[in-house]
Image (cartoon, rainbow, N blue to C red):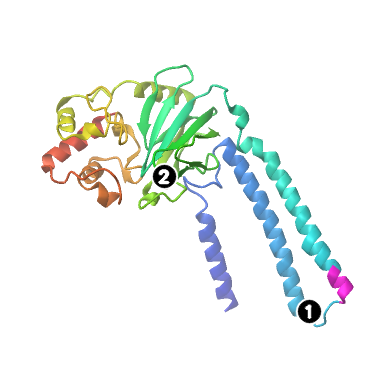
Amino acid sequence: MRAVAKGAVVAALSIAVAACGGPQSALHPAGVEAQQVARLFLAMASAGAVVWLAVMGLLVHGLRHRRTAWEPRRAGRLILWGGAVLPAVSLAVLLAFALWLMPSIRPWAAAGQGGLRIEVEGHQYWWRVVYRPPDGGPAVVSANEVRLPVGERVELVLTSADVIHSFWIPPLGGKMDMIPGRTNRLWLEAAEPGTFRGPCAEFCGTSHALMAFPAVAMPPEAFAQWLAERASPSPNAGGEGREAFVRHGCGACHRVAGTEAQGAVGPDLSHVGSRLGIGAGILPNDEQALVRFISRPDEVKPGVEMPGFAMLPPDEIRLLASYLRGLR
Ligand code: CUA
């Protein structure tokens, strides 16, 4: 029986530990701020484990070996030292450690240093992302994907268009709420290239769990080239697909740079074909997924504001999907 119980504990622990990896793990830091958050977590968790083991040890000792009560003076001393002095000292040490780490977890000193600024606005249930290069180059509007250069501190300006959302890329740094009527700032520095997942970390409605984005940390040269390519319209923005896009009124909500579609209500689709996914991190970026989203967005993402277009002839929907795939 004991062996079975041991086996169960080991199995449960290995599942728990295996779940600590992946593109959304704060325990596999790939950013300067996240490294400090992970350090703080390890220090807190280890100190908590030591305290827990000590208390459990005392409990087992008491249950197994002590049949008589301690005399009151001795018991009083144990409570004073173990119940008041020890927690006060250990909590003070942990607090001091956390305060000492604070400037590197929330580097306010980076304000005004003039690096790349990325504005992210939360919507039910997607993200507007605007890149403002430090050299005064043109702003690049995108959605549902955040890219940043490795080794450079990036300022994230966080706002919300409707309810409270929360911006979080666990492998890169701590989370920050996006609050309507308020601007919050976060600084992140990716330490290594990689593709991570950023979830919305504040319940914001029916499809809160379906509101995420890929975060891609790129080598600086690759990032500069990527951004420069996004500053001009896609070479495939014209043609038959554009006509269908405009004819069916998509341009009232969505923008495709270089066309008459200049809507600002929904996500900017200027280069949607080159994004890693669609629907804010929930579907792969392929024609089938686009057809599905255009036809019945509410089925993919309950509560979404976009109306469905299932009433259009299938050929028209496919034409729209292949047009969007081509916007690279
Ligand atoms: Cu947005 Cu939860």
Q: Residue at image x 84%, y 72%? A: 75
| 54 or 8: nearer the viewer | 54
Q: Residue at image x 19%, y 36%? A: 320
Question: CA gap, disc 1 to disc 2?
Answer: 57 Å
- The magenta-colored residue range is 71-76
Label 2, ligand 1: CB separation under 8 Å: yes
Q: Left or right of 247: which side holds 207?
A: right
Task: Tell me which amino acid carries mark 1.
Answer: His
Residue that mark 2 sits on:
163
Q: Is residue 189 visible?
A: no
Q: Quadrant of the N terminus?
A: bottom right
The image quarter in which residue 189 lies: top right
Q: Position of residue 275 (x, y in %)?
A: 34, 35
Q: Left or right of 221: which side holds 237?
A: left
Q: Left or right of 7: which side holds 88?
A: right
Mark 2 residue element: loop
Q: Earlier in the sequence, mark 1 or mark 2?
A: 1
Mark 1 residue element: helix
Q: Position of residue 57 (x, y in %)?
A: 73, 69
Q: Position of residue 10 (x, y in %)?
A: 56, 65
Residue that mark 1 sits on:
65
- The secondary structure making up most of the magenta span is helix
